[in-house]
């Protein structure tokens, strides 16, 4: 019987060998020793006896046996050899009583390489077994900035807490998100693991029934995306039919996972027809008003960020008094967002702007259930097909503001007050520092975070002898002061110089035009890409205003730079750029990719300071940073 099985396995091996050669791939098993010649191993960890998923057993430890197997672990040595006889005997043993002896293997990057037991693995794979018992030693690579290695470190932490080695991730942060969804911070007990295994089993069957196995994404990333939409409690009670229906509804969220760079950046608005003619066509005077909702995480009185968006909402109302009505809802939280969304949709809102990234997480379920409603969230780099994101390239204004500061700071020292270490903020800081360096190569930017527990701006300025400060971009109505924009201290009082401006009204007006003209719909045609609107000075959504205290020559410089920047003649992130540790981040005569600007997690070399960890921040800042925060690139 075993001889017949070997002949069938040999056919599979020969076929795989032929296919690999036709595709230009190695037809043999990967060899761990050769892989590690290009990888620095930090340490080894003995895991002991482990039930290993066979799909993760991919190669052999040394070259000795690799030519006996095709890349799929099927044999390629002819029948009648000692090898074929031993393989056939193992096949008989598997049929009669099952292979019981554990193999010995190394684990590296969540893949297993056999030290002893290659034929056992081959036989078990032939019979389509799910797993094999193995004595495993883990080889741990040195932590670097390589994303795959970061994901692996996150996976090791996940495995230690959950005891699971059957769930795989290819998206950084998803292992942590899965633990958050389950809601158990300590090590999982057997009941928790069994419950999750059962949920994962039902989900995987429903996902595969809808064709999910053709997407080429891991089941770990898929289940996290599904839980992002519906939540663990809801998914735990779903029937197989409900699960398949829900998977179909949020199918585009899974498709987005198939692309590594899965966010398309729209850098400028498309040109549309004159707004009066356009609105008269879509919204005749006899029709009901078009309802647009604005959801604020705080009140406009308490937050300069919300206040700026509220001014944008008022601008929209003034621009279209007869055609558009608005709904404003303040103090919306992550817990209340689903209820608030359903309420404003029930009131007729078909376009909804959420002005805080913390509102994104709780909105997905409503967005999936209401595809007729356009929901946009003010944040960067959030890969969702059902909710588009938008932001503005404030770093352009910060670049010019930095030039003003560099030109005027007599002792070459400038303070930069930042709030949340999130996507977009790091680009603002670096652009400011590069602008200062353009006009003053001696300029140093001293970075301080207003959300850190030990924040004390007056003490910071005094200790570092700093008189020029770049602070928040707008005043807070409930706490009006002159500490905004770029200012200098004279006799203990701030003298305002330049102020970056968020023209959110311009953004909202142009976005409404885009939706009504159909450009919004056509921009989202790519099934595998989420969309992020990231408009700048050229679109009018960002500006920089000079006060009379700026010297005339510097005012001319500002006007010239604004003109050139809007015309695309200059770029803030152009040419050679170096980080604080001396690493070259951009080469000469080239502009940096927008995707790289958006994802910055490092500071340029004339910045004094660092990016804080979440533990250094006040409690009120943590929800936003947990969702959209960046952590400084460091080798640990």
Image (cartoon, helix red, strand yellow):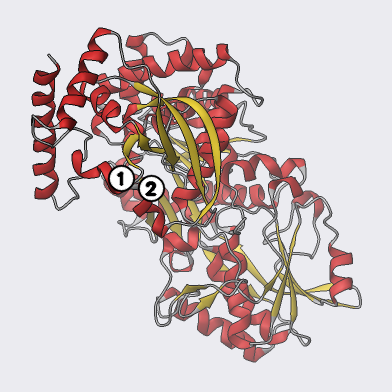
| Residue 539 x %, y % | 44, 64
Q: Is residue 500 visible?
A: yes
Camera-side residue: 506 or 381?
381
From the image, tell me which residue sits under label 1: 524
Query: How crowded is the residue under tag 2: few (<14 C-alpha within 10 Å), some, or many (20+)?
Result: many
Q: Give above or below for 3 relative to 613.
A: above
Residue visible at 44% across and 74% down in the picture: 566
From the image, tell me which residue sits under label 2: 531
Specify the quadrant of the image occupied by residue 282: top left
Camera-side residue: 496 or 611?
611
| Residue 605 x %, y % | 62, 75
Location of the C terminus by quadrant is bottom right
- Asked if the residue under mark 1 is in contact with the one under mark 2, i.e. CB atoms within 8 Å, the reply is yes
Q: Give above or below for 199 relative to 345.
A: above
Specify the quadrant of the image occupied by residue 55: top left
Numbered badge on residue 584: none
Disc 2, SS: strand
How far separated are the C-alphas under marks 2 and 1? 7 Å
Specify the quadrant of the image occupied by residue 130: top left
Most extreme residue toward the front is: 82
Residue visible at 52% across and 81% down in the picture: 561
Give left or right: position of 305 versus 597.
right
Q: Is residue 283 visible?
A: no
| Residue 159 x %, y % | 53, 31
């Amino acid at each position: 019987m075993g001889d017949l099985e070997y002949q069938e396995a040999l056919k599979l091996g020969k076929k795989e060998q032929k296919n690999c050669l036709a595709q230009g791939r190695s037809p043999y098993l990967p060899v761990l020793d050769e892989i590690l010649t290009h990888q620095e191993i930090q340490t080894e960890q003995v895991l002991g006896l482990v039930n290993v998923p066979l799909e993760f057993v991919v190669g052999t430890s040394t070259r000795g046996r690799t030519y006996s197997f095709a890349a799929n672990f099927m044999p390629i040595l002819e029948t009648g050899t000692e090898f074929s006889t031993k393989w056939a005997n193992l096949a008989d043993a598997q049929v009669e009583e099952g292979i019981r002896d554990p193999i010995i293997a190394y684990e590296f990057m969540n893949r297993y390489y056999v030290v002893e037991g290659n034929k056992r693995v081959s036989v078990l794979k032939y019979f389509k077994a799910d797993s094999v018992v193995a004595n495993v030693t883990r080889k741990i690579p040195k932590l670097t900035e390589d994303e795959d290695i970061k994901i692996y470190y996150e996976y090791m932490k996940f495995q230690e807490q959950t005891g699971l080695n059957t769930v795989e991730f290819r998206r950084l942060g998803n292992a942590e998100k899965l633990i958050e969804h389950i809601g158990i911070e300590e090590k999982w007990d057997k009941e928790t693991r069994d419950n999750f295994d059962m949920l994962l089993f039902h989900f995987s069957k429903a996902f595969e029934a809808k064709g999910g196995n053709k997407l080429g994404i891991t089941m770990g990333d898929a289940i996290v995306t599904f839980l992002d939409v519906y939540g663990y409690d809801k998914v735990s009670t779903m029937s197989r039919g409900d699960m398949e229906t829900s998977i179909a509804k949020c199918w585009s969220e899974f498709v987005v996972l198939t692309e590594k760079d899965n966010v398309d950046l729209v850098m400028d608005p498309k040109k549309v027809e004159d707004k009066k003619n356009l609105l008269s066509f879509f919204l005749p005077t006899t029709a009901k008003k078009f309802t647009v909702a604005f959801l604020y995480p705080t009140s406009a009185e308490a937050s300069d960020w919300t206040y700026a968006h509220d001014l944008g909402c008022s601008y929209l109302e003034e621009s279209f008094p007869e055609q558009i009505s608005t709904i404003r809802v303040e103090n919306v939280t992550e817990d209340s967002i689903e209820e608030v969304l359903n309420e404003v949709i029930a009131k007729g809102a078909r376009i909804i702007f959420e002005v805080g990234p913390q509102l994104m997480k709780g909105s997905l379920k409503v967005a999936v259930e209401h595809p007729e409603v356009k929901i946009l969230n003010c944040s960067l780099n959030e890969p969702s097909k059902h909710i588009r994101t938008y932001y503005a390239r404030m770093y352009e204004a910060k670049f010019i503001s930095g030039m003003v500061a560099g030109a005027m700071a007599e002792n070459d020292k400038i303070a930069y007050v930042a709030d949340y270490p999130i996507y977009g903020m790091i680009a603002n800081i670096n652009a400011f520092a590069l602008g200062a360096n353009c006009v003053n190569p001696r300029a140093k930017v001293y970075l301080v975070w207003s959300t850190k527990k030990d924040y004390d701006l007056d003490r910071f300025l005094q200790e570092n002898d700093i008189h020029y400060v770049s602070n928040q971009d707008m005043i807070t109505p409930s706490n009006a002061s002159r500490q905004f924009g770029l200012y200098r201290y004279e006799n203990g009082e701030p003298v305002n110089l330049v102020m970056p401006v968020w023209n959110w009204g311009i953004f909202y007006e142009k976005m409404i035009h885009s939706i009504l003209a159909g450009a919004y719909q056509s921009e989202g045609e790519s099934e595998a890409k989420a969309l992020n609107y990231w408009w700048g000075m050229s679109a009018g959504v960002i500006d920089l205003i000079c006060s009379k205290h700026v010297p005339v020559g510097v005012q001319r410089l500002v006007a010239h730079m604004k003109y050139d920047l809007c015309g695309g003649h200059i770029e803030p992130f152009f040419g050679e750029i170096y980080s604080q540790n001396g690493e070259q981040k951009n080469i000469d005569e080239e502009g940096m990719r927008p995707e790289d600007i958006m994802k910055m997690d490092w500071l340029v070399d004339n910045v004094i300071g660092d990016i804080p960890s979440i533990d250094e921040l006040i409690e009120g800042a943590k929800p936003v940073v947990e969702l959209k925060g960046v952590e400084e690139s460091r080798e640990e």
